[in-house]
Every structure is written in C-alpha cells, then in structure tokens.
Amino acid sequence: MHVLIVLAHPDRSSFNGQMAELALNVLSAAGHTVELSDLYGQGFDAREGAWHYQHRHKLEMFDVQAEQRHASDQGTFAEDVTRELERIERADLIILQFPMWWFAAPAMLKGWIDRVLVYGKTYTSRMRYDRGHLKGKRAMLSVTLGGAESTFAHNGRNGDIELLLWPLQMSLHYVGLTVLPSFTAFDVWGDRGDDAVQARLRAHLVNYAEQLERIETMKPVPFNVWADWDENGQLKPGVQGHSLVMRAER
C-alpha cells in the first residue's frame, strides 16, 4: 500500500519527528511506499482565507464552503492544497502524527483539515460518512501527550483520551476514511539526557513499531453509517450508537 504521513510539529528533530521517521522506516521495510508531508517544514499556511482563491466565486463576501466548492469544480485550488490533495489521493493509509496541545491537535493540523478536506472534493452534503469521497482508504492518529496515561483514563484529570481524540477521528470518518485505533505515547516530557526519560521514549518507539507491523489487520474504530440516521439526523430506533459524545437523554 501507499502511506502518507502528515507531521504536525515545528521541530523535525522532536520525538514526533522521530515517530514519523520510525513509521517511514518500518512501513518501507514491510514493502509499502511512504511519503511524508512535514507541514511546518514546508511552510503550510494553516489559515483559511480569501487570499488563497485567485478565481473567486463571490467577491462581496468570503463564504468558505462556496469558495471551496467553486475551486473544486474549477480545479483552481491553491498550490499547497493541490499538493496535499494529490498526496491524499495517492494514499491507501494516512497517518496523522502530532502532539496534543491544550487538549486538541495543534492549529497547524486543524488548519490542514480545514483547507485540505475541501467541500466539493472530499465531501458534500450527500457525500459524507460511509459515502465520503475517501471511502476505501484508512487513517490513523499517532499522538504524543505530556501527561501520564493514568491522567487520561476515563476518570483522569486530563479527560478520557478516547473522548479527546474522537472529534478528530470523526472528521476523518466524515470524509469516508476508515479509522484505525490511535497510537498514544503518554508521558513524553523531561530531560532527554535522563536515562529514565530515554527508556520511556524508547519503549514508546518499540510499541509504535509493533502497532505499525500489524496495521493491515487492525480492527477499525466503529462509527455509525448514513443508514443509521433518520431524516432528523438522529439514530433510528434500535440502532446502536457509536458516538462517544452522545449522552443519555436527560
């Protein structure tokens, strides 16, 4: 398969950079082709704005969806968006590598999603979820966190890691991607010259390599499909809900 690794960390030599390099090496050794999109390194502009559209659909106001749809129809995306879309189209598997900052992905990665998963190309009102344009491709999150794993448990002070990552996973499912279980590296902090810190980081790399080696057989994260929802966008009676942020009726 062909793999796209999207790296969202400002320091290529960081632990996130090491994890991206490890993924490239492990997957290449397994016979796959791999390419890396280093968002900071290539100067990707995470800001969506009118200046990205030379052939505007509406000049009197900036309507993001209208401009994205027009660019999709006309094939007039900005150069950096065109490059990333071509990478996505080539990929069978997309790995998003990033640190968790303030309980979410960095703004760089959120901007990549905002600008690259464009309306009209990767999704429309009728082309979403299991009908999304990227159906048949897979995606996985690889995340580093400063806190201990216990603090991201269901009752941890930092919040349940599965709940924190679900919105990003949902975004991938929204455009049709099959989402694989995330890899989470906890407790990534401390003096890199400290033996205990180095041992902890090496253990993460070993565990990540093991997950990558079995990536072709991993069971996907369950999501509801289009047929599960009624005309009001609510689950049909008797259908099991897979949304992690769906609460019981009060």
Image (cartoon, rainbow, N blue to C red):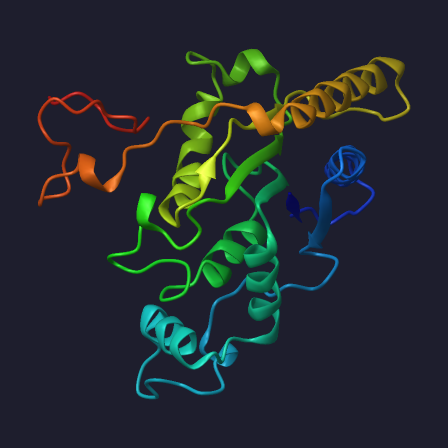
Q: How many marks?
A: 0
Question: Against 32, is 163 above or below?
Answer: above
Q: Does residue 220 appear left or right of residue 86 in this picture?
A: left
The C terminus lies in which quarter of the figure?
A: top left
x then y, percent, for residue 129 = 32, 45
The picture quadrant where one finds residue 70 is bottom left
x then y, percent, for residue 137 = 50, 44
Q: Residue at x 69, y 64 (%)?
A: 43
Q: Nearer the viewer, residue 154 or 215?
A: 215
Q: Does residue 77 appear left or right of residue 9 in this picture?
A: left
Q: Residue at x 49, y 54 (%)?
A: 113
Question: Against 157, is 46 above or below?
Answer: below
x then y, percent, for residue 110 = 50, 51
Q: Residue at x 47, y 35 (%)?
A: 179
The N terminus lies in which quarter of the figure?
A: top right
x then y, percent, for residue 231 = 9, 45
The picture quadrant where one finds residue 224 is top left
The picture quadrant where one finds residue 86 is bottom right
